[in-house]
Image: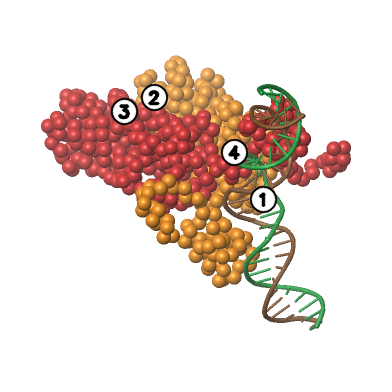
Chain colours: A orange, B red, C green, D brown
Amino acid sequence: MHIRKRFHKLFGEVKNVEKTVTIKDVARKANVSISTVSRVLNNSGYTSASVKEKVNKAVDELKFQKNMVATAMIKKQTSTFGLIIPDIKNIFYGELTRAIEDKAHQHGFNVILCNTDNNLEKEKEYLNFLLRKGIDGIIFSTPEINDRNIREVMKSRPDLPMVILGSKVQNVRLDEVLVDNFDGGYTATEHLIDLGHERIGYIGGQQDSYATLERLKGFKAALEERGLPLDKKHIKLDEFKIHSGYEKGKEILAKKDRPTAIFAGNDAIAVGVYKAAREVGLKIPEDLSVIGFDDSQFAEIVDPGLTTIRTPIAEMGEKTVELAVQIIKENKNFKESIMFPPTLVERASTASIKKVH
Amino acid sequence: MHIRKRFHKLFGEVKNVEKTVTIKDVARKANVSISTVSRVLNNSGYTSASVKEKVNKAVDELKFQKNMVATAMIKKQTSTFGLIIPDIKNIFYGELTRAIEDKAHQHGFNVILCNTDNNLEKEKEYLNFLLRKGIDGIIFSTPEINDRNIREVMKSRPDLPMVILGSKVQNVRLDEVLVDNFDGGYTATEHLIDLGHERIGYIGGQQDSYATLERLKGFKAALEERGLPLDKKHIKLDEFKIHSGYEKGKEILAKKDRPTAIFAGNDAIAVGVYKAAREVGLKIPEDLSVIGFDDSQFAEIVDPGLTTIRTPIAEMGEKTVELAVQIIKENKNFKESIMFPPTLVERASTASIKKVH
DNA sequence: AAACCGTAAGTAAACGTTTTCAACTAAGGC
DNA sequence: GCCTTAGTTGAAAACGTTTACTTACGGTTT
């Protein structure tokens, strides 16, 4: 001790070798065996009060922190989830990720973020990494309806907790949490019909996306139920992006018998439609009603405020994590499908057709 | 082998015990020692071509994947970064995080996401976790100018690669990558002055944020240089959020001698100002010019398009990771400060003062 | 008094790699 | 023919924990 001080004084900044303190150091200091230390640390097994105290004192004095890598090695648990999404820049995934990370943190898990851009090769790379790192579970939030990687992982690691968020994957039975996309599509369309619109367009995302398809089904069902014709040229699928809404919006709105209302597959697409409408000289909602999906931050920012179908993003993210945690703790897979109801949020982008004199 | 097949046939779905295949299995199959397997896996040391082949064959056949936890245990490297940000929901951090994660992935690193909400206690929790998990480096992107946690980590783990992104921390010498906030503030203000504005407001973020302060300095410097008076009641600091822009915007715009232009501390604040202006009945840019900061997605979405100071978010994120990787690989800390230049992006939210009536 | 039990604590194996060390071979130089 | 050396491999230790097993002790129960 004394010597060390002198040493420091003499050389000033000594190269800080600073051996990380391990359970062995604690054991030595507390004058017990390492198994005893481990026992009080995890309070498992029998430990006397006196020993407990000694050990805790040593822990405090040495500022000992358990090395989780070593723990992971033997327990085969890393308290880490992998989160696989297309792109965190996308505001929808931002909100989702935040909810997931928060809930995971509450349960003592960290999350490793993976952006795949819907690229299956990239997804596979990430998956390999995650698996080799011994993550405790994977949360998929990929729109892709036909993800062979997921099936592969299920085969090679049938034990690994996985839950799918916001989508379904074909031929796969897994825990999943979803919005009722059909219902959302139906509600959105019904809302427009109730306002008197008869020519309604739909601009959706990727055509191999579960959400796109289900929302479209809801759209069609509503039209049919109300006896309105389905005009295929007013239905466009592209991507869940602003740009797509803009491009497809312009296409649709350029036509002579343009729709008087557009159901956008999500809020980003709706934002693109706003831009297209502006360019074509159409006023929202007077000349064109627009309804979105998700109720993301975009919906409030835009002027006029976007009427949209609210997806309970945060709730879904939280539920997903809770499911994953439960699967881990109870060590069994429920293969549940949890469906959240969407709700209509009326702002200022939809109006009665009557306004169009 | 035969027996096993029978077994499977008899019982169909046998409980899949599926011992994960280890280097030992490979060694047994290839008829060599585990050290040899390790050598060909990492191709280190001497290995004959024939043995190499045998081992690789065994690896393929068994579909062996190295367990990274075990590797981490002995190498003390996890190929993982911790990323500490206030909130991934915030679109700015979404863009930043994407760039960081991409670059990290390119270099073979994963990133653990941590949302702190600028809460130092929460940050500390995350830090503890990360440290115990043996992450290879930490990227901080917290606005807080006075982060005691960072200082603490530097003390306890002087060897740990850390870089600060987008901010500076008092009394700390660390690698950092920044935008030139002063220059950005100056440029924004100058732009407004050039358009003929003489009464200009500033709505900034947290007052203990480096960005807020520097941008304000630039603002003041520009005013002074051009001989314009500084009106304190037109300067408001709150948070880098839409809501703050709205609230403070309303306060400022309610006044009789309201400014004819507002420099918003970031794009989110600008969006709030838009809303405030709308409520007060001011048209942008005819009645009020607004300039933002960041050039995030918001800037394009909003109508009219937001003139703003572009922060090269992606480039900064990438550079940060490259710096971190370099520090790890070369095992030395550069303590560099890398400054990126911001640029003015003109859209439609700023106009010459002459346009007013 | 023998057998049993609950409590307490230590010894050593285990987790799956990497790496040091030692052992051995074959080839080349003298 | 001996020494050196480069090439090749295996045994075993190490990384920092957890845990199964063992030992020990004092007190009950029979």
- Return the residue nearer the eye: A237 or C18: C18
Residue B90 x %, y % = 40, 39
B124 horizontally vs B23: left or right: left
Identify the residue at horizontal 21%, vertical 28% (top origin).
Answer: B190
* Of callouts 2 and 4, the N-terminal one: 4
User: Residue A144, located in which quarter of the rendered image?
Assistant: top right
The chain carrying label 3 is B
Identify the residue at horizontal 32%, vertical 26% (top origin).
Answer: B305
| Residue A163 visible here | no
Tell me the amino acid under the disc marked 2.
Lys
Residue A212 x %, y % = 55, 30
**C-alpha gap between disc 4 and disc 3:** 37 Å
* Of callouts 1 and 4, the N-terminal one: 4
Residue B341: mark in rendering:
3
Residue A275: mark in rendering:
2
Residue annotated with mark 1: A331
- Return the residue nearer the eye: B202 or B176: B176
Residue D7 x %, y % = 68, 27
How busy is the neighbourhood of tag 1: few (under 14 within 10 Å), some, or many (20 plus)? few
User: Residue B196, located in which quarter of the rendered image?
Assistant: top left
Residue A130: mark in rendering:
4
Q: Are marks 3 and 2 in contact (CB under 8 Å)?
A: no
| Residue A2 visible here | yes
* Of callouts 1 and 2, the N-terminal one: 2
